[in-house]
Image (cartoon, grey):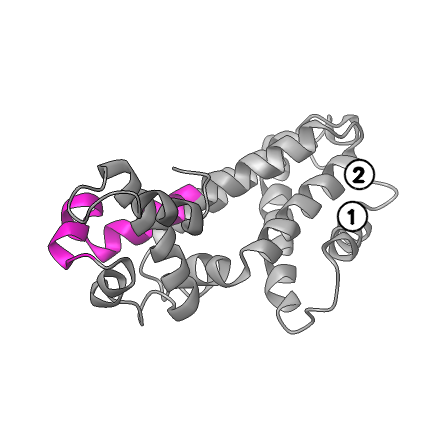
Amino acid sequence: MSSETIEEIEEKISLHKHGKVPKNLRIAQIILTAKKMFADNGYANSSMDELAKRVRVSKPVIYELVGSKDNLFKMILTETGHDLQSRIQNAVNLAATLDAKLRAGGLAFFNFVSEHRMLWLALFVNDQGLFNKEIAQIRKQQSDLVGNLITSSNAFENNSPIYINGIAHALNGAYEALAIWWIDHPDLKPETLADWIVELLLPTELPIVR
């Protein structure tokens, strides 16, 4: 998907006559506008009527280009999940030690949530159980990433795969729970939360579970 802003996309669209806008530009506009709509209203309170009004095209055009509201939400959910995972992976790759990797990954996560707070809530928290399968897949990918991270550390080399998998899910859940708690404490910085996670989850002496 396009990395351009909605303003940049709409500036390009303004250069074309109505009905002559290139398909890729219109799709990019619809997706970026839908992200804002879902962030503003959540899934349940968003409608294709409102999206059509915001984009200034008819509903049939939107359905033709991106499908139904469900399909559009899933598309954005998947794209956002991939973006989040990529940012965490890139941050982790630049760190050397386990504690540095955990902090770097945590900081990437909390920075992402800070930048996309309302969209993140709409996609991953206020989903009302409608997209559990897709959200579960994204969370599995995140847990696999964390699992690979801790498996690469000598501190965990003697532990069983099931233990590593369980710890990865616990770590992933801790990051997400702290991000939700953060909503009521917006003055805290992402760096502070990342430090807390490392202090909480990485004891000085690690147990060995076979």
Residue at left offset 80%, top offset 51%: 195
User: Circles 2 and 1: CB distance less than 8 Å?
Assistant: yes
Q: Pick the residue in front: 113 or 51.
A: 51
Seen from the viewer's position, the closer of residues 209 and 205 is 205
Image mark for residue 49: none
Mark 2 residue crowding within 10 angstroms, few (<14) / some (14–19) / many (20+) = some
Residue 162 visible: no
Q: Amino acid at mark 1?
A: Val
**Left or right of residue 105: residue 67:** left
For the point 37% across and 63% down, the residue is: 37
On screen, residue 77 versus residue 148, left or right, reads left
Residue 169 in sight in this render: yes
Q: Residue at point 58% right, 46% down? A: 169
Identify whether 176 is placed above or below 94.
below
Q: Is residue 129 magenta?
A: no
Q: Quadrant of residue 117?
A: bottom right
Verify whether residue 78 appears in magenta. Answer: yes
Residue 205: image location, x then y, percent = 86, 41
C-alpha gap between disc 2 and disc 1: 6 Å
Give the structural element (helix, strand or loop) at label 1: helix
In the visual, does 173 lie left or right of 97?
A: left
On the image, numbered disc 2 is attached to which residue? Answer: 99
What is the magenta segment's predominant secondary structure?
Answer: helix
Left or right position of 21 against 164:
left
Q: Which residues are magenta?
A: 57-79
* Residue labelled with disc 1: 198
Query: Relative to 68, does residue 157 appear above or below in the rendering?
Result: above
